[in-house]
Amino acid sequence: MLAIVHAENKESSWQHALYLFDSPKYSNGFNAFDYVNPSAPKGGHLRLAVHGTFDTLNPYNGKGVPPSKVAAVLKYGFSELNEPLMAGNGSYAPSMDEQEIAYGLIAESVRLDKDKGLLEFKLNRKARFHDGQPITSSDVVFSFNLLASLPYGRFAGLNNQIENITTPSPSHVIFHLKKPSPIALPLHIAELPVLPEHYWKNNDFHKTTLTPPLLSGPYKINRIAAGQWVELVKVNDYWGEALSVNQGKYNFDRVTLYFYRDLNMAFEAFKGGNVDVYQEVQAKNWATGYNFNGVKEGNVIRQEIPHKMSYGTRAYVFNMRRPFLQDRNVRQAISLMLDWNWTSKAIFYNAYTRTKSYFPRIPEASLSKPSAAESQLLKPFSETLPPELFTSPFPFQETPGNGVQHPQRRQALALLKQSGWQLKQGKLIHSVTHQPMKLAFIHYGDSQFERIIFPFIQSLKTIGIEVTLSRTDLTQYYRRLKQHNFDMTQFIYPLRHHPGEELMDFFHSSSVNNNDGRSLMGIRDPAVDYLIEQIINATDKNALETATTALNRVLLWQHYGILNWNGTTHRIAWWDHLKNPGKFPPYGFSLNTWWTEKNNSISR
């Protein structure tokens, strides 16, 4: 029998967990997760470095850049996000030793009846917002209706899969699902952040704001300096302190997120003892930068922590709203000029591996021929898809790694010639428009990325393509993404092991004109649209994974982006007053399980 979403054991009874395929690791009434120290001491001040900036504290309306949209914030485990119905499967407090699982948080128990299409949550009567108001089923309905009605975001369009919502009592909410319902829909609903209805009825949800909104979690925003730092303080009477999912977590009295626009400045702050822990994202700096006194004297600890997690699929993406980038030959030619083997050796110290799949669960899909089930799914689009897709695995270019790209250059120029481009006096000129090919590549942050992208730009110049590289701050970067004002950029797609509705935002044609900065590629491809709809509406595991593998294959063969690289370790350095449980789970990393042995609670 094929696996389907379950509430643990009998679906007709109230259960503590909701899961997609595998049974929960932790039984009802469990004390704490295995990777925490339930007896961890409380207190102290944790100071963290974040690369980027922010200009709003509302993470849900798609306006501006909230802290949780900046890369490291969610990984650290402290953010401005609202608590969800259940913890484990979404951005808030993800489970780190299981996948596709949710345990009770605001909802203390769950009941799923697939035959009747009923998903029920029983809310914890102790659940409170920080102003003392109880969290009720009315808040759940308000949150769902608000977030599902937005044209963007994790919950956009989810209301199309719900018949209606009923609330038998303030602590009981029932989602009546349309049948047949997608396999992952119950887990997706369990991720719903619960917003305070009484607060947002008196505040404009659709505007950016630097006024801390009302939350319900273990921390509240105490104060901020716009774009520079956010200070979180522990809520003394936090309603969920005794919950199993919170044991051994949130041990610091105060957490300050310091935002740095320059990675070098962030690292200098760590070296000087002004930041307590540093997550190293530069392979070169990890190899050569840790010879300062703190390391020499044994006061700074360094560790590479293995993991099996994908923190997003990194890719150089094409904006196909540009007419010349709508040509697959052009995209393939540009892709051929990325010399991964040289980059890996010369720049990354062989610290990363080449990413070969958009979806972390199916890396082997690009290395094999399509299955019979995939071919059947893709058959209606055989006239528009490359014929090689049906007969061959996707070929990732291999080079000697010494900078020599003569075969790739010849192949790229041949593809470009087929599309009317010719190399004349060092410039790529179109035979009809007589205009040269120019690419505007945008990125944000400091100059470290430029040493990575520059060799790629130089390779493109050898086939006559002029590339303009523009560095912006994070606010300008997101503004240009929302205005679709770029030709290429690097983006990290937060794609889950089993993706769902988020694919609509990233790759579906219905999102091409959205100004939320998520449909970067601007894909208008009937095959992609069809496969996304098959994924979202899949009712069993085989259908879900077949459609996902087929979508991965189409994205690769159509050259909509150039997959980058990924790592298999967290590179972490910390000052030795910080302690951790010593157990590092495979599917995540979070500092919210750590603690300090010194009382450094002095306010900034």
Image (cartoon, rainbow, N blue to C red):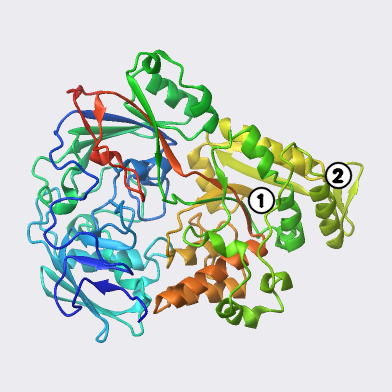
Q: Going by the image, does 408 lie left or right of 487?
A: right
Q: Which residue is mark 2?
A: 427
- Residue 536, how many percent across, how many down? 43, 73
Q: Going by the image, does 259 lie left or right of 346?
A: left
Looking at the rendered structure, the kind of residue marked 2 is: Lys
- Whether residue 205 is visible here, answered yes or no, is yes
Which mark, residue 382? none
- What residue is rendered at 20% in x and 54% in y? 199
Earlier sequence position, callout 1 versus callout 2 = 2
Which mark, residue 487? 1
Looking at the rendered structure, the kind of residue marked 1 is: Asp
Nearer-the-camera pick, 324 or 122: 122
- Whether residue 486 is visible here, answered yes or no, is no
Instruction: Determine whether the residue tagged by mark 2 lies in a helix, strand or loop.
Output: strand
- Residue 300, how many percent across, how many down? 35, 21
Neighbourhood count class around disc 1 (C-alpha, 10 Å): few under 14, some 14–19, many 20 upward: many
Nearer-the-camera pick, 543 or 186: 543
- Residue 400, how many percent across, how many down? 74, 42
- Residue 294, how many percent across, how many down? 37, 16
> How many numbered marks, from 0 up?
2
Above-or-below relation of 200 to 498: above
